[in-house]
Image (tube, grey):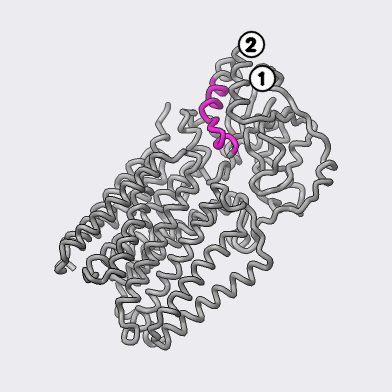
């Protein structure tokens, strides 16, 4: 418990960011027409691929002889990129269909 | 961390927020997606090139190969897949993100000297591993269920108790590891395995129309896993991006639940159960009247109001183009045609809109449930194409039905109902539909695309 309080104290900035980001997420998504639920879910899914940044950091910090870490990092990068590229591409394909017709 | 990288991350985080915001409006959605993608690209490039580490060339080469590989595969899957397969694809990609977070956690666990690392860090690593594992296995099961390779309703006896035991085991083992600072791979892999198991057990018994809710929830969890990894590296773009997806995902999940008149709690714990009605009881519902394409065509040709109810069957048969042809044909003959869109028609909210938009159906003709329901009593003919659970009156009048309480399209108020189905097989929720036995209902059996093509041909000849 003492350590948790210490952690919060040392990372107060992070705690603020988390709380504010939660509210931004809620506000941004509020009152979305049902038509856009699927593309929105798909877009949010692409964003969750931001974990790729962590995967790249793992590889950058790995020793070039640490094959286990490199292998896992490599797989993590591939999967993360799949999530990002596939996610954005699919969302774009869905949205392409919403042509404006008047 | 260099100032330039911090600024790049800041820009990326802003593009995520702006992108999500723009995704919420039909006119700006496309640019929103693009903006977020550019931000993501910047964050990725910045991470690779801006740092003061001594990195051997081979690692850059490996990162390059990994990114190229993922981009090519992801791109190909995304442009090749049929529109009907969209929901399971989102689930699959989401699972990959979760797996990525888990792998990062495993590497970090190996890298850090657990005995000296602070308990908070160890707890952070473990939660990334566990949440990532749950989303990975859960998303794969959801993917399998949606594409039909996993049987849609699997009942596990007292699954709630088993699930709770698994989650207690995960928490107990993690606490043990964190508090006592034990550096044990066996313990780590046990926790990892328990996480994977929980994901499977969590999604397996959930069925029917609840599937999109689960995908949305898992999507939100991936965001949280990304954010946790962000805390680990003190990385702002991961933190902000992850939390955004996490909280937006939860709101989206709740919105979907509300559309089905269910609570998140009942989706997770009171999963759909197929009513175990024996074959014999079907007879009690009455008899089925089947009709022909020419009879239905005549009926629609001389109607003044026709409402089309599209469902997943239409999507599977790829009948979205020919249904648009039918609608145009009827409109040209002076018939007032509309589409009734149930919030969860298809496999995901908005799925049907995406499909019909693909075949150039006018936005204005797609009417949402609350607006169309009062209009059914004025409709001369309702054409139900491959929809089942969303028009099942049991949701109104059978308290024992698993879908009781779910809002449905009140098609039974129309003067005539034509239902196109391939066979009398029960719908996705696996329950009987008394609408098909209604005296006003005529069944038009056959593949949706073929049947509607026949209808179009018949009407053209009139």
User: Seen in the image, is B248 located left or right of residue B71?
Assistant: right
Give yes or no for contact between labels 2 and 1 (Cβ–Cβ under 8 Å): yes
Q: Tell me the chief SS of the magenta region.
A: helix
Magenta stretch holds residue B299: no
Q: Can residue B3 be seen in this view?
A: no
Which span of residues is magenta-colored? B313-328
Counting residues from the start of the chain, the first of labels 2 and 1 encountered is 1
User: Which numbered tag is attached to residue B297?
Assistant: 1
Q: Which residue is drawn at 40% across and 69% down?
A: B128
Q: In this view, does B267 lie above or below B198?
A: above
Asked whether, in this view, residue B343 is left or right of residue B59, the answer is: right
Quadrant in which the C terminus of chain B is drawn: top right
Residue B111: x %, y % from top left: 30, 76
Disc sitting over residue B462 in the figure: 2
Whether B329 is drawn above or below B406: the answer is above
Q: Mark 2 lies on which chain?
A: B
């Amino acid at each position: 418990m003492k350590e948790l309080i210490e952690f919060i104290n040392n990372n107060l900035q992070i705690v603020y960011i988390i709380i504010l980001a939660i509210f931004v997420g809620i506000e941004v998504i509020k009152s979305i027409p049902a038509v856009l639920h699927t593309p929105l879910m798909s877009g949010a899914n692409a964003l969750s691929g931001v974990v790729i940044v962590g995967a790249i950091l793992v590889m950058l910090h790995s020793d070039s002889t640490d094959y286990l870490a490199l292998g896992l990092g490599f797989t993590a990068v591939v999967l993360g990129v799949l999530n990002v590229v596939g996610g954005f591409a699919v969302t774009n394909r869905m949205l392409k269909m919403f042509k404006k017709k008047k | 961390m260099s100032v330039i990288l911090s600024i790049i991350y800041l820009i990326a985080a802003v593009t995520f927020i702006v992108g999500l915001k723009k995704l919420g409006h039909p006119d700006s959605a496309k640019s929103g997606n693009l903006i977020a993608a550019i931000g993501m690209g910047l964050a990725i490039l910045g991470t690779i090139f801006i740092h003061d580490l001594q990195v051997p060339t081979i690692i850059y080469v490996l990162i390059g190969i990994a990114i190229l590989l993922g981009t090519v595969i992801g791109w190909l899957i995304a442009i090749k897949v049929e529109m009907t397969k969209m929901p399971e694809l989102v689930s699959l990609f989401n699972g990959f993100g979760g797996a990525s977070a888990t792998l990062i956690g495993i590497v970090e666990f190996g890298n850090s000297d657990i005995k000296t690392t602070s308990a908070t860090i160890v707890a952070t690593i473990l939660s990334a591993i566990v949440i990532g594992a749950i989303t990975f296995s859960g998303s794969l099961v959801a993917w399998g269920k949606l594409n039909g390779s996993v049987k849609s309703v699997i009942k596990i006896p007292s699954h709630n108790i088993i699930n709770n035991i698994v989650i207690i085991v995960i928490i107990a083992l993690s606490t043990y590891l964190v508090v006592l600072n034990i550096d044990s791979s066996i313990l780590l892999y046990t926790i990892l395995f328990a996480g994977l198991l929980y994901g499977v057990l969590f999604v397996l018994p959930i069925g029917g129309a609840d599937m999109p809710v689960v995908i949305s929830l898992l999507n939100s969890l991936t965001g949280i896993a990304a954010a946790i990894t962000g805390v680990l590296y003190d990385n702002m773009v991961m933190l902000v991006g992850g939390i955004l997806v996490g909280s937006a995902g939860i709101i989206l999940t709740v919105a979907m639940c509300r559309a089905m008149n269910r609570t998140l709690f009942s989706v997770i714990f009171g999963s759909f159960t197929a009513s175990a009605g024996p074959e014999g009881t079907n007879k009690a519902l009455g008899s089925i009247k089947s009709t022909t394409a020419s009879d239905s065509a005549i009926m629609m040709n001389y109607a003044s109001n026709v409402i089309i109810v599209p469902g997943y069957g239409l999507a599977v048969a790829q009948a979205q183009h020919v249904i648009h042809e039918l609608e145009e044909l009827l409109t040209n003959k002076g018939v007032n045609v509309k589409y009734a869109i149930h919030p969860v028609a298809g496999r995901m909210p908005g799925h049907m809109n995406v499909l019909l938009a693909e075949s150039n159906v006018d936005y204005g003709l797609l009417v949402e449930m609350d607006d169309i329901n009062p209009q059914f009593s004025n409709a001369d003919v309702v054409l139900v194409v491959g929809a089942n659970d969303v028009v099942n009156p049991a949701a109104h009048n059978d308290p024992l039905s698993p879908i009781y309480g779910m809002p449905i399209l009140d098609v039974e108020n129309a003067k005539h109902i034509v239902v196109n189905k391939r066979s009398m097989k029960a719908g996705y929720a696996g329950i009987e539909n008394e609408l098909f036995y209604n005296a006003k209902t005529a069944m038009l059996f056959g593949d949706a695309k073929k049947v509607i093509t026949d209808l179009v041909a018949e009407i053209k000849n009139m």
